[in-house]
Image (spheres, helix red, strand yellow):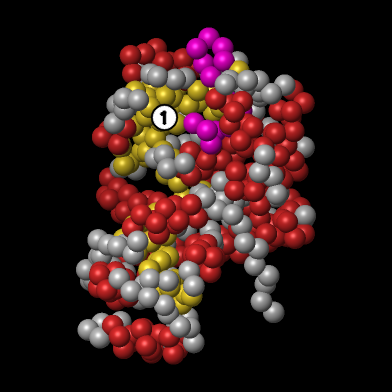
Amino acid sequence: MAEDIIYFKRKIYDKMLQWKKERNGDTAFLIQGARRIGKSTIAEEFARNEYQSYILIDFSIAPAEVHDLFKDISDLNYIFLRLQLIYRVQLIERQSVIIFDEVQKEPLARQAIKHLVKDHRYDYIETGSLISVRKTTSHILIPSEETKVDMFPMDYEEFKWALGDTATIPLLRNAFEKRISLGDSIHRRMMRDFRLYMLVGGMPQAVSAYIKTNNLSAVDLVKRDIISLYEEDFMKIDESGKAAAMFDAIPAQLSKNLSRFHSGEKTDKTAEIVKAMEESMTTNIAYHANDPNAGLALTKDNEKYKMYTADTGLFITLAFKDKDFTENIIYEKLLNDKLSTNLGYVYENVIAQMLRSTGKQLFYHTIPFAEGKKYYEIDFLIPEQHKVSPIEVKSSGYKAHASLDAFCEKYSERILHKYLIYTKDLKRENGIDYIPVYMTLFL
């Protein structure tokens, strides 16, 4: 029996509306993102709401006769007639849209976009994962007539919408912009709500399971299925299994506070795998900025990086993947606000996710101690107004921020704001903005 689909409000919908209005069929809309984040669902929902009719071609299951249509596109009238007969949908000029779902499965359909858009009878929406799209387009002409948009797992505001709460985030944004402290009782409630988001994550199927069952064990099962799916995909990226092993090792690497550094013969191969994992959008990669300034990408070190999962809900399941759900201590400790210091890397992962979902690229920086063996680390850097703002993440012990101090001393002329993201209430003290973790999305 088909699973009931819950349609969640997603921010990308507004971008699609803007595209439809402003481009008026001059480009196709390409949604790029990891698998299971809701690309196909939002594409079909948009088609259903905003057009008189639509055809959804899922190239992962489309019959051979549909694939064959794109081998010769000299007669578009014939192609449109065949599609209408196969899918039993009447297309209406300038009132219908055709969705190419999993477009990476039929590269010739993507190549045809140039001519389909020029024909201008219908609109076109494409969905695909970036890595698959790139891997399957090496022998085709990439159309320039595409509006490409990255889609991520549900951010915290979308998660709140899914739970029926549209008021909290605007109120928090107002408090953030005016630097108003919330007070202990409200802050505690906000943290409790946010910890639930960390546990469930932003994968629509996991959120749906939570809403239906109110059971984190059921949510965990969904997340394990998604992790298995990703691991299968990683084997396609890299048959040696290194990509899958690196993904599985993310919690362990972060818990050791390791910046992975590779040198020698394996550098190029490893860098290639890391790039492919980043393009799959299943992971978020923070690269070391060797000379931190407004142009962070200019001094990016491809051999020094930290890897995060794109969804923190998956991260929590991944951390205890080999054990039963009941042994996953992060669920219990996070829910009860008893997360120990050595589990603070969970917060680092969710902050990476929140920064990335607002379109920011991730960078970090290290400053060696005088003796050279240890170093101060700034967890994240964001460019702001021709300067740079350092972010130090603290899950506890926030009164000491040696890394932030060292960075600010060394690069004082380049700094706009100093941020310390932590689990306490909003405040400003000694030139540092102390930001509760749930307000990260406003940076």
Q: Which residue is mark 1?
A: 381
Q: Is residue 93 or residue 214 the one in the foreground?
A: 93
Type of amino acid under label 1: Leu
Name the secondary structure under disc 1: strand
Residue at 46%, 15% in the rendered image:
405
Residue under the image location 66 percent in, 76 percent down: 2
The answer to which quarter of the image holds residue 180 is top right
Q: Position of residue 96 (x, y in %)?
A: 43, 73
Other residues around mark 1 within 10 Å, as few (<14) / some (14–19) / many (≥20): many
Image x and y of residue 426, in percent: 62, 22
Any part of residue 359 in sight:
yes
Give the extent of the magenta segment.
428-443
Height in image: 369 above or below 364?
Answer: above
- The vertical placement of 121 against 336, above or below, is below
Q: Is residue 344 visible?
A: no
401 over 148 or under it: above or below: above
Most foreground residue, 241 or 247: 247
Residue at horizontal 66%, vertical 52%? 162
Of 16 and 103, the residue lying toward us: 16
Where's residue 30, x and y in %?
A: 38, 61
Residue at 66% x, 43% y is 166
